[in-house]
Image (cartoon, rainbow, N blue to C red):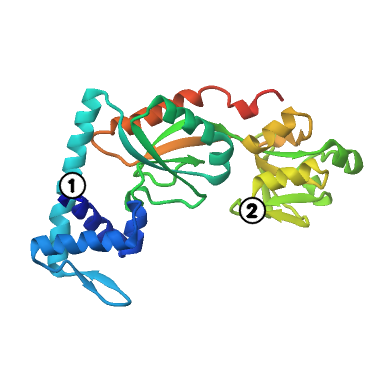
Amino acid sequence: MDRLDCDRMFIAVFESGGFSRAAKRLSTSAGQASKLVTRLENELGVQLFHRTTRALSPTEIGRAYYERLKGLIEEFDALESSVRSASGRAAGRIALTVPMSFGSTQLAPILVAFAAVYPEIQLDVSFSDRLANLVDEGFDAAVRIGEPEDSSLIARKLCPMRVIACAATSYLARRGFPAGPAALADHDCIIDTNFRDPGVWRFRTPEGEPVRVAVHGRLRFSNPEVCIAAAVAGLGVARVPSFIAGPSIAGGELIQVLGAFELPPSGLFVVYPPGRHLAARVRALVDFLSERFRGVPSWDQGW
């Protein structure tokens, strides 16, 4: 371990407020985090944190050191990135966070292909539906569905993302096709609880007017793949992202319903913190994703 490791860990502990969170941010153990900060304190001959069994807080000297050090580390990282970018060398670690279902079903094979093309890049990918703070948690980039809420991030749109309603022919033969969104009140709805308001399904009339429908059903899942499995089994109408439903529709297991009332698509984005220089490794990933998702998404083809 060198002095730069100690300084980076000090910043992580200061910003996250604890050794465990800082260790997770930098992919190490809490014991190693404490060891690095202690070594830094010994080298400087000062105490940077007050430690108790319940809390950790910076000393006055620790705060002053952080204020000066943070800018120096950012300058160092910017310099390193600019040199790597100028040389065209894409190497080093990328910490990336991606949505759980989309990441496992659609993004995983693309990331594997990226790793094969760039053998000098180390990928550290977190699969989670939690909206991570990229800067505080040490992520280089994120793949997100929907318009980014954080305006401080730079976002590149990769492709459109649709949400559709669908059902199996066996179910529709028993219950009939819903003629409009209001007809869902008489249908068994399979509810994906990942949506912000899962009991209300949103549509749009052909004239562009928004429609909100309260839906009911005995099946509620926090996983869209399970919702589709239930729909394929003929248990009701599901409303999920098309990247989940598309293969079953293309294979004839499901049929889209209420297509005339489908909402305009949102988008799939790759986002990353702003900076004067984007690291060559991150630029390579952004460009690779943009190329792979160009045009009509594969999951929306064939139906």
Residue at which label 2 appears: 222
Residue 203: name its quadrant.
Answer: top right
Disc 2 residue type?
A: Ser
Q: CA distance from mark 1 to mark 2?
A: 41 Å
Residue found at x 82% / y 47%: 235
Q: Is residue 133 left or right of residue 67?
A: right
Q: Is residue 138 left or right of residue 40?
A: right
Camera-side residue of 14 and 205? 14
Asked whether the beta carbons under mark 1 and mark 2 sit within 8 Å of each other, the answer is no
Picture coordinates of residue 135, whole percent (x, y): 32, 49
Picture coordinates of residue 156, whole percent (x, y): 42, 32
> Which residue appears farthest toward the bottom when viewing the image?
53
Camera-side residue of 205 and 101? 101
Mark 1 Cα-neighbour bin, 10 Å: few <14, some 14–19, many ≥20: some
Residue at which label 1 appears: 73
Residue found at x 28% / y 33%: 279
Picture coordinates of residue 296, whole percent (x, y): 58, 24
> Which residue appears farthest toward the left when viewing the image?
45
Residue found at x 72% / y 43%: 228
- SS for tag 2? loop
Residue 152 circle label:
none
- SS for tag 1? helix
Residue 44: name its quadrant.
Answer: bottom left
